[in-house]
Amino acid sequence: MKNNRSLSIFFWIVPLAFLGIFYFYPLGSILKLSLARSEAGLLTPFIEAFTSASVRRVVGFTFWQALLSTLLTLLLGLPGAYLFARYNFRGKSILRAISGVPFVMPTLVVAAGFSALLGPNGWVNIGLMKIFNLADPPIEFLHTLVAILAAHVFYNTTIVLRMVGDFWSHLDPRLGKAALVLGANRWSVFKEVSLPLLAPVILAAGLLVFIFDFTSFGVILILGGPHFATLEVEIFYQTISLFNLPLAAVLSVLQLGCTLLMTILYTRLSTRVTQPLNLQAKRHTQSKLSTWRQKIIATGISVLLLIILTTPLLALAGRSVTSLGVINSREGSLAPGLTLAFYQELGINRQESLFYVPPITAIGISLAYAGATVLLALSMGLPAAWALARDRKSPLNRILDPLIMLPLGTSAVTLGLGFIIALAHPPLDLRTSPLLIPIAHTLVAFPFVVRSLTPALQSIQPRLRHAAAVLGASPRQVIRHIDLPIIGRSLLVAATFAFTISLGEFGATSLLSRPEYPTVPVVIYRLLSRPGALNYGQALALSTILMIFATVGMLAIERFRIADVGEF
Amino acid sequence: MLLSINGIRKSFGETQALRGIAFDVAKGEIVALLGPSGCGKSTLLGIIAGLEEPDSGSVIWEGGNLAGTPPYKRGFGLMFQDYALFPHKNVRENITFGLRMARWEQDEINQRVAEVLDLVGLPQFGSRDIATLSGGEQQRVALARSLAPRPHLLMLDEPLGSLDRALRERLLSELREILQKTQQTAIYVTHDQEEAFSLSDKVVVMNQGRAAQIDSPNAIYRKPVNAFVAGFLGMNNIFEGHIAGGIIKSPIGNLPAPKGSTGDVTFLIRPDTIRLDGLGPQHLEGVVITRTFRGEQCRLEMEIQANRLSFSLPSSETQIPQIGELTQIDYDPTNTIQILSK
């Protein structure tokens, strides 16, 4: 037993050292900076910040938009979850797979997608202008609250679908039948039986959605425009544009406190969800659509989901190969119609400025960062997962298990700010290190990596090895046929997670990237914030490329993951 | 008649779960639906309760057709296999659920809960959590929950199915006592003939969605009508034969034929009327090939002209033959040979 513990500690050393230097130290530095001017008392900087009307507005709006987004997401997600949980129908597995796509999409891609669908140069406005012969785009979507809400719903519906749907699909439908026979009408059954049983998982899913909406960055920066600042966006502006690091630090601490509280609440709730409820195998709980009413409702929900979850991405891909009008550039002009010109432009350095590179090089830079992230994340995540899998209930692991999930609840912009404050001067000056961004990405990917590795490592129980041995496998054959295939698949899943997360990461990167080494999302942001159809087209082309990478990554994860009920 | 089931049919895709089953239930009667798994018993309960709709046929309650009446307006009780107790409510809340739905007064509810908890022998269990109950306790709570609103008809779906044997036997006799004490009209679904026989006034033996035989337990045991019922009751000595001149010509030899039948017949040799006392009046001879000790009884199989015949002897019998022994058995044709319908 003692031996076991020291081995666990040994496994923990490297990942904990990494988290200590690159997570806790920067966060500590933020805290220190935010308290630096608090001679008058610990809370002075915070009280000062709150006397400012603009900070109050930012905080209020952050909560308000997250609440609205969460409610809308639940409104769309719950009927979908019910449909997925209780019925089998043709196209269900495809619909389920599609519903997972938004979740892995980089924020910049989503923002570009909504812009391509509903922006001033988006399909809907172009169509309406053509049909009604209008001079100006009739729908004002960009830089409105609606745009923010739409993107958040697009993003997070899948969380409700999967978390609530999975749980619901294992709930015994006979409980509802028992209530019916005992004299409860449909409404009472829902109120007395289904809702109380689902409440914890709905709350947990809602809270997770709320956390994501609360810390959302890219979507609000681009779709919300300058009028709608959330805490996250405000930290970015204060850091990059105004260089008011102390205020940024105060806001970060506020942000951290909120997400920390919500994360703790979420963990509490999710343990309640895993309480034993005599959960049933799916085949006992799902039936075919039989009546016309069921079929119509199911079709309605499916079509609605399909429209909301696919149109922005389809609009993006379509718009990236379509030229609308004559674009004049130094190289000549571009006629309306289908074109690959935007993609060809990616290889050309138009600006010719010293710190500007052709957009296509950003792909190479992003891939290099992603590769480094995979290596780093696996070498940190594997030992941690191994230690966790050995004995999840040991006192050490019970403390460390939630600890390693902390980066999940920390906003990427805050991480970036922490790096700027802590790692820009001795003893650790990493400003120019090419590893700075992969390290930040590793922190974001770390919880996902550990969460995908631990169940697989746990599933290799001694019994499995014994069974193989009794069946005549030598120790070497056991490793080859049992251990490696099981770990191998989840290693692949973990690596893909790290890779796709790194490719799409924008929050931390936006603060840390150097002008001469931009990543793909950074270039998309630059292109989107510039005028001109050519810049816009290139932004969409790059976004489409990123979208393809993310989709392939997600398909790989779905294909290779082992557990049915995934741990978030 | 209180309840009439008339020609109910129900299919799920290609499979026909029910194919025109019909039977009646009188007030205060306990009817057992007995059949192998997959014979449509649970589906039928769902239809009677109103949880599922039949493709055709009708459920008539006190002369009125129940089609279109939702389950919550039927006033029936249904005890599910594995009980389906609400995991988020405690014992008391589970039991009061049906009473609250029926809008009982609070003091009536209190009184009734105490009553049914007493009835099922769990008087102190009101505040217990469902998750803390053993299998047998869950079964009793489920029974109390379905009895509490005084259902006009109580349906029980394999209520003892998942319990171990000793507990089953104890709960079976308790269940019988409770149902009799409350004079509850009930339909009891089971695949276990012992449960069906010991509990019910009438047994409906089901086979592939139809009623194979409807009769009192005693009559079914004494005179199974066809090969399926006989086989399901464990009587496997079923042979084809031809009757002419008072004699059955059959693969196990010529036997005396019961009166009233001629031509090609299927017949049963009951395993429980065979003796070894040499008193006849008829004999069969064969070699014992298996011998299985089963507690009170010993089951033997003997080979007669390449056919197998099985029978039971009391284990107290002193001269049970050994395997390989050439043995002569005695029987009385009037209670041993039964003609079955095809």
Image: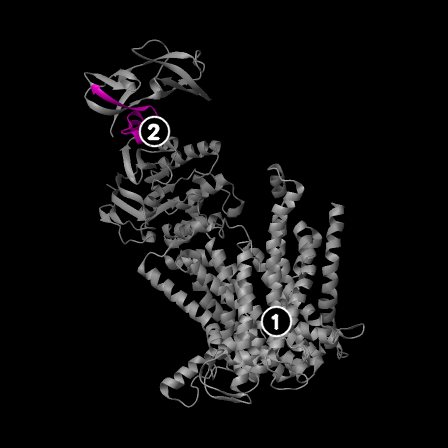
Residue A284 colored magenta?
A: no
Q: Say which residue label 2 marks.
A: B231
Q: Nearer the viewer, residue A454 or A130?
A: A130
Q: Nearer the viewer, mark 2 or mark 1?
A: 1
Q: Which SS class for mark 1?
A: loop
Q: Say which residue label 1 marks.
A: A505
Q: Position of residue B20 (x, y in %)?
A: 25, 42
Residue at mark 2 to residue at mark 1: CA–CA distance: 70 Å
Residue A475 figure quarter? top right
Going by the numbered disc 1, the residue's amino acid type is: Glu
Q: Which SS class for mark 2?
A: helix
Q: Chain of mark 1?
A: A
Q: Residue at x 48, y 52 (%)?
A: B89
Tell me where the magenta segment starts and ends, as one range: B217-243
Q: Residue at x 76, y 50 (%)?
A: A6
Query: Which residue of the protein is positioned furthest toward the top in this rendering?
Result: B278
In screen coordinates, is B145 left or right of A494?
left
Same chain, labels 2 and 1 = no
Q: Chain of mark 2?
A: B
Q: Residue at x 71, y 79 (%)?
A: A45
Residue B45 vertical position relative to residue A258 in the rendered view, above or below: above
Q: Position of residue B225 (x, y in %)?
A: 27, 29
Q: Nearer the viewer, residue A295 or A477?
A: A477
Going by the numbered disc 2, the residue's amino acid type is: Gly
Residue A82 figure quarter? bottom left
Q: Position of residue B176 (x, y in %)?
A: 38, 34
